[in-house]
Image: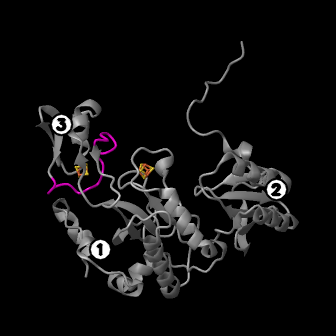
Amino acid sequence: MPEYREPIESGCPDGFQYMHPLSVKNFGQWKYHTHPRPGVLMHEAFSGDRLWTVKCGTQRILDVYTLRTLCDIGDKYADGHIHFTIRSLPEFLVDDEAKVEPLINALEEAGFIVGGTRNSVAMISHTQGWLHCDIPGTDASGVVKSMMDELIDEFRECNMPNRVHLTTSCCQINCGGQGDIAINVQHTKPPRINHDLVANVCERPSVVARCPVAAIRPAMVNGKNSLEVDEKKCICCGACFPPCPPMQINDAEYSKLSIWVGGNHSNARGKPTFHKLVASGIPNNPPRWPEANAIVKRILNAYKEGARDWERINEWIERIGWPRFFEVTNLPFTKYHIDNWRGSRARLNASTHIRF
Ligand code: SF4
Ligand code: SF4
């Protein structure tokens, strides 16, 4: 009787089966890499093998026709080798320098932008928004599209002091970004409660438990089981809205955008850092979000002019100090930058927000 192995029903499949043969052969044996031009990396292994990677940008949420176009280009010009980075950038791998130029030409002819390597503004990552989430306060992919249109040259070229990661987030609480520059939704009013629906739709104890500041209480309203919010306590986070849509917090006027800077997940060369609020109450203004775009460009220009080579945004700000950051970006420092939530007393001294 043959012995069968147990099926593996979780986790991702073995990646080696999909990798370029040179990547498999030289796994862990790479000697160095160079950056021959924006959008292209060349890795050389101790064996002498060389592998070129060509990176391009996409609209991030890909339809099947675009995917087929990318795969056709991969089949024709890159021996069928394509993979996607964490920011949804397709990368093609080729084992011969002569294959690089025709591949780039084919990508550019099809409308893709080659770039996003080294000290460029890498692809902006965004959360799912209206496409398949039930709680967004803005159209994250729309914000990203309008911003990428404005920053396309910064993606194509390597003009920044170091790599810049931008992120967006369409609610305040969930998969939102932590990046060099993050554009996040900011609710500015407590939820309005549709009391007629609460008893039918919401599991009230779960909603009460969701509130991080204990601002929600059960209440009887017009003879029906409902909820009430202590608006003095509410921090307008929106956490009650996902389990209870009648706690309506999204609002065309009062759901704004905010911009945060200096976040870094990585601990490769320094400690991870939290991002910090630098602009709040920005109009959530589709379809081009001009106010948010203007602030992001102002921050990028100040960073480009003021940072030393290879300083990330958080390192640049740490060196020049937050007062100087607000001066060089010409952003107003307002009362909204001060974290005055009473539960934060214990950590105020640890906050850069009040070191002025
Ligand atoms: S950021 Fe919030 S609203 Fe946007 S996709 Fe994630 S959970 Fe949904
Ligand atoms: S918005 Fe946040 S703080 Fe306000 S009631 Fe809802 S969960 Fe609580």
Instruction: Look at the numbered disc 1 and give the secondary structure of its residue.
Output: helix
Main SS category, magenta section: loop
Instruction: Look at the numbered disc 2 and give the secondary structure of its residue.
Output: loop
Q: Amino acid at mark 2?
A: Ala
Q: Is residue 178 magenta?
A: no
Q: Please indicate whether residue 266 sits to the left or right of residue 157 in the image.
A: left
Q: Residue at x 80, y 55 (%)?
A: 73
Q: Give, as a single range, the part of the protein colored magenta.
A: 231-246
First-in-chain label (3 vs 1): 3
Residue 149 drawn above or below residue 304: above
Q: Amino acid at mark 3?
A: Ser
Q: Position of residue 190 (x, y in %)?
A: 23, 54
Q: Amino acid at mark 1?
A: Thr
Residue 121: in sight, yes or no?
no
Instruction: Look at the numbered disc 3 and give the secondary structure of its residue.
Output: strand
* Quadrant containing the C terminus in the rendered view: bottom left
